[in-house]
Image (cartoon, rainbow, N blue to C red):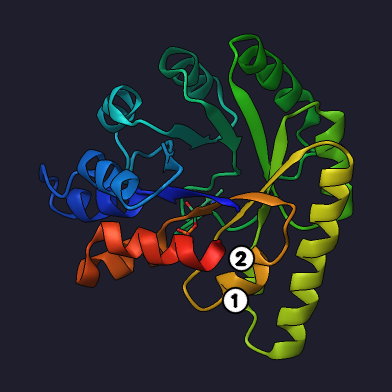
Amino acid sequence: MSRLSVNVDHVATVRQARRAKEPDPVTAAALAELGGADGITIHLREDRRHIQDRDAIILRKTIKTKLNLEMAATQEMLKIALELKPDMVTFVPEKRQELTTEGGLDVRTHKDSLKKIIATLKEAGIRVNLFIDPEPEQVKASHRMDVSGVEIHTGKYCDANDGVMRDEELKRIYNTTLLASKLGMAVHAGHGLDYYNVKKVAEIKEIEEFAIGFSIIAKSVFVGIERAVREMKELIG
Ligand code: PXP
């Protein structure tokens, strides 16, 4: 059964809309765990548009599952990660103007800067995943970086508006998952997954973990976080 790491960034987005104290992503994480979440994911962005440093520090102390910190490969974030000691860091590309992460990392282009940062995190006992598009070249490049795993970007599959395109994207996810798994890397997947499109991806048994945020938090407005998480867990199970 695949694990589910619940991304609570969107709870912080609502809070930051008013620069208020609520809703608190720390409370959301606790309720997500009660609903069966196997981990909590946060993206501490350079511009701090949703998750704040305070959230990361408190979550590190309070969550009972695993903390996955998504971040850009910068010196500022490296320093924070070394102090915070999340269970895992997932490197993502970051652009200021984007609404959300738009694509996977180009591991080949950034291999020199990534290599140093990855080695430092590994020395500190932190697992490292790279968020990549479902392309064999990116999987092979990630393998050469000696990371524990990859997170396959499912965004194009989720955004595909016709069946042929969706099937093609699913096949790309499947093929790259198998390749990464064969190379001995843990395979995670995420971005854009919801209650309608997750099942087909979840049929790929080699995917160990899903990182899902928006659809769960959106549903939780109406049914509460515990139930929203439980229903997603049933679908990926
Ligand atoms: N994985 C990564 C690397 C992401 O950047 C995001 C979005 O923050 C997610 C998973 C979750 O995506 P969504 O919120 O669309 O479920």
Which numbered marker is on residue 155?
Answer: 2
- Residue 192 in view here: no
Q: At x 37% / y 60%, what residue is drawn?
A: 230
Which numbered marker is on residue 95?
Answer: none
Residue 48: image location, x then y, percent: 34, 39
Q: At x 33% / y 64%, what residue is drawn?
A: 228
Residue 191: image location, x then y, percent: 55, 59
The correct choice, above or below, for 41 with respect to 222 in the image is above
Farthest top residue in view: 123
- Residue 11 in view here: yes
The correct choice, above or below, for 222 with respect to 116 in the image is below
Which numbered marker is on residue 159?
Answer: 1
Question: Neighbour class for label 1 at 10 Å: few (<14), some, many (≥20)?
Answer: some
* Mark 1 CB lies closer than 8 A to ligand 1: no
Q: Are marks 1 and 2 in contact (CB under 8 Å)?
A: yes
Mark 2 residue element: helix
